[in-house]
Amino acid sequence: MEGRPKLHYPNGRGRMESIRWALAAAGVEFDEEFLETKEQLQKLQNDKHLLFQQVPMVEIDGMKLVQTRSILHYIAEKHHLFGNNLKEKTLIDMYVEGILDLLEMIIMHPFLKPDDQQKEVVSMTEKAVVRYFPVFEKILRDHGQTFLVGNQLSLADVILLQTILALEEKVPDILSAFPHLQEFSVKISNVPTIKRFLEPGSKKKPPPDDIYVRSVYAIFAP
């Protein structure tokens, strides 16, 4: 019997949160070993568990995987979240890459200086509503399906919903001009595995606060 995946990262969202979302959407139970000290990180590095000396790191199927996108690809491929053919896989990959560009701004936001944080909210909102959301609104409108690619849940749906919900925490009406994305958000949120992940008590992490930011600096600062 395969052991459960084990995730190595601080106790917060960061770049591990997309991996948590993907595993949860696939219905995979996982364990977490939270990094709380610089010494824990150094031990992983010294024991040669981190290929490029960085986390996220996921122990899965006898491997120690690093690099967020590679981990997401492995989970998606293994658990049928990567389409049914090469064309669908390429579309999913392309959509995910675009969404992750936007999500990176959200990930880095709490680490900005306080004076810069509100400016960045304005900037990420503008990019979302001008560059990214119109693309996905058109995709959903044109093909009339619930999901972005084909007619089944994919990694693209999962990461898009994650990003929408994270942005709504900062700008609650950010989808006001995108009716198809509003409908998408409701429907994907009600996929049974995702619905469970969104319920209180799941391993979904809360918005990053000052305690999380300080802990990250304590672990990773030179």
Image (cartoon, grey):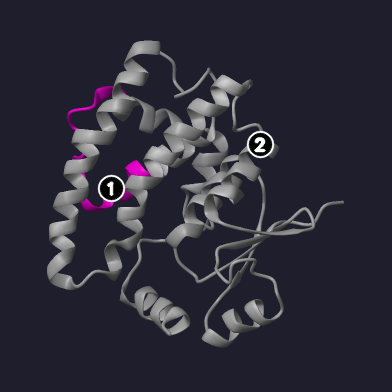
Disc 2 marks a residue whose amino acid type is Glu
Viewer-proximal residue among 94 and 183: 94
Viewer-proximal residue among 85 and 161: 85
In the image, what residue occupies the spot 64% across and 66% down? Answer: 51
Whether residue 177 is in magenta: the answer is: yes
Spatial CA span between label 2 and label 1: 27 Å
Viewer-proximal residue among 8 and 173: 8
Disc 1 marks a residue whose amino acid type is Leu
Q: Nearer the viewer, mark 2 or mark 1?
A: 2
- Residue 61: give x, y in percent of width and height: 77, 53
Asked if residue 125 is positioned above or below residue 114 in the image, the reply reads: above
Q: Give the labeled residue for mark 1.
A: 167
Asked if residue 156 is positioned above or below residue 146 in the image, the reply reads: below
Query: In the rendered structure, which segment of residues is drawn in magenta?
Result: 163-180
For residue 27, say whether it is visible. Answer: no
Q: In this view, does 185 lie to the left or right of 77?
A: left
In the image, what residue occupies the spot 49% across and 50% down? Answer: 18
Dot label at residue 67: none
**Image quadrant occupied by the C terminus:** bottom left
Q: How dense is the environment of label 2, judged by Cα within 10 Å: few (below 14), some, or many (20 and up)?
A: some
Q: Give the labeled residue for mark 2.
A: 77
The residue at the far top in this view is: 143
Identify the element where label 1 is drawn. helix
Q: In this view, does 27 lie to the left or right of 99?
A: right
